[in-house]
Image (cartoon, helix red, strand yellow):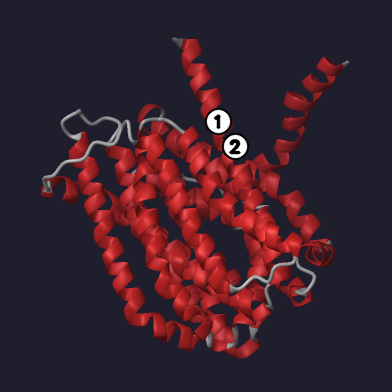
């Protein structure tokens, strides 16, 4: 029994690591090709479009997926079809609302960004959006049944098909257009849907009846997580949207280059957050708030220790890195210097949300993220008018500093968190890593 449990965790851990690695690879490799086959204007337009789609996917996923994963594992055989049916009803309702908004405001967006070439792409996107709605529900059912292999394969199919098209065009020299990218986007979504159905069909149980009590229960659970997710992604895309409308899509592209490179070294933050959430939820019940305080300080310190070498390298070799990844975007170098500064604050904010959600303070997390996003919006407007593209970087830095300060005040009040301890744990990480892992490894090899 114990061996089976160990095998489960080992297998799940390996699959999740592979999924994170494959996602990072496809994103980086696709980005490397896109900046070479598209003009600055075209790349900026595609980034703006992807920002819109990301918002809508997050709206639906934040409201539906967490609730489905939360309630399905412990549900009785009688309740499982009710939960799945209710989840699909919420998902389809949101999809309908989002599609209506696309058709109503698509013209306004493309006019604001001066990107008329995006209009047919935006009107084709509902095909993808409906498809991903089913995929996300199927993936959530897989996760609720503690299976991750299907989730990994589905992710690889969707990202891999899109990257394969880019790679073939890049190698052979085929011209890439935005509308062709959209066609491949649709194809990859449809293939992912087929793949997800193959994995989930044995556990997919549906009901022909509507269950208002379960719709209400799922909605009430997901609404604050949904609000936090939307506010968070808005905070991360507001600057690029405003650059696209106030300056040009090319300006949004320049800023996106710096953000993408910064995100490469932010991978440890997401990985540690996924580990901390269940641990924090468990420890608040069994060991009390002191244990959660330690978990926050230790996890942030660990992430900082992993981030700092990458931040230092990128800061001093920004020109070299951008020259390799995106040689047409030398103007992004000063932007990268600014984005790297607030990259060091991200672990504090991400773990703040993780810890507060785990101790039942999801409403507080939502309000903090909402305040930060609103501040980011206002600062971007004034700073972009004053300093152009650099103003977006300054605005995001300032809003992150304010969000960081508010979060630390709340953590101090709720858990007596000491920010100095995070720096101590970061410093101690290096000798601990050396003595616990490198020394035994050298002894085994010798």
Q: Quadrant of residue 240?
A: bottom right
Q: Is residue 233 visible?
A: yes
Number of numbered discs overlaid on the protein picture: 2
Give me the C-alpha separation between circle 1 and circle 2: 6 Å
Give the structural element (helix, strand or loop) at label 2. Answer: helix
Give percent across and percent down for residue 418. 55, 47
Q: Is residue 394 visible?
A: no
What residue does disc 2 label? 17
Query: How many neighbours does mark 2 have within 10 angstroms: few (below 14), some (14-19), or many (20 or more)?
Result: some
Marks 1 & 2, CB-CB < 8 Å contact? yes
Give percent across and percent down for residue 407. 47, 57
Give percent across and percent down for residue 290. 46, 35
Query: How many neighbours does mark 1 have within 10 angstroms: few (below 14), some (14-19), or many (20 or more)?
Result: few
Q: Nearer the viewer, residue 416 or 175?
A: 175
**What mark, if any, has residue 357 been given in the picture?**
none
Q: Quadrant of residue 332?
A: bottom right
Residue at 40% in and 85% down: 107
């Amino acid at each position: 029994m114990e061996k089976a449990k160990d095998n489960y965790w080992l297998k799940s851990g390996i699959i999740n690591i592979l999924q994170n690695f494959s996602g990072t690879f496809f994103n980086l490799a696709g980005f490397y090709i896109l900046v070479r086959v598209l003009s600055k204007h075209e790349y900026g337009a595609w980034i703006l479009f992807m920002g819109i789609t990301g918002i809508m996917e997050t709206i639906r996923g934040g409201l539906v997926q967490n609730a489905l994963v939360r309630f399905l594992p412990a549900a009785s055989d009688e309740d499982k079809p009710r939960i799945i049916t209710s989840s699909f009803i919420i998902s389809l309702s949101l999809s309908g609302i989002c599609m209506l908004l696309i058709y109503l405001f698509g013209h306004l967006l493309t006019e604001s960004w001066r990107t008329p070439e995006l209009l047919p792409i935006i009107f084709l996107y509902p095909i993808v959006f409906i498809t991903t709605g089913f995929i996300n529900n199927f993936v959530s059912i897989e996760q609720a049944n503690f299976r991750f292999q299907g989730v990994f394969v589905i992710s690889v199919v969707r990202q891999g098909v899109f990257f394969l098209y880019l790679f073939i065009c890049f190698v052979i020299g085929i011209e890439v257009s935005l509308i062709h990218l959209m066609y491949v986007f649709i194809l990859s979504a449809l293939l992912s849907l087929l793949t997800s159905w193959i994995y989930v069909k044995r556990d997919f149980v549906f009901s022909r009846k509507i269950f208002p009590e379960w719709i209400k229960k799922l909605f009430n659970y997901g609404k604050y997580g949904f609000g936090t997710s939307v506010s968070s992604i808005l905070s991360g895309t507001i600057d690029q949207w405003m650059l696209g409308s106030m300056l040009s899509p090319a300006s949004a592209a320049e800023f996106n280059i710096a953000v993408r490179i910064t995100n490469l070294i932010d991978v440890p933050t997401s990985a540690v957050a996924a580990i901390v959430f269940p641990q924090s939820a468990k420890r608040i019940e069994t060991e009390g708030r002191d244990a959660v305080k330690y978990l926050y300080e230790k996890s942030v310190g660990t992430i900082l220790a992993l981030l700092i070498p990458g931040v230092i390298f990128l800061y001093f070799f920004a020109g070299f890195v951008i020259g390799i990844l995106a040689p047409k975007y030398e103007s992004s170098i000063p932007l990268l210097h600014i984005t790297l500064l607030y990259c060091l604050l991200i672990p504090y904010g991400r773990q703040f949300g993780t810890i507060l959600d785990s101790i039942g303070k999801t409403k507080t997390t939502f309000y903090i993220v909402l305040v930060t996003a609103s501040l980011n919006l206002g600062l971007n407007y004034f700073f972009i008018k004053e300093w152009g593209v650099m103003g977006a970087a300054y605005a995001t830095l300032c809003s992150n500093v304010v969000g960081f300060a508010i979060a630390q005040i709340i953590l101090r009040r709720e858990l007596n968190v000491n920010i100095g301890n995070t720096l101590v744990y970061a410093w101690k990480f290096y000798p601990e890593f050396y003595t616990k892992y490198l020394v035994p490894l050298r002894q085994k090899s010798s």
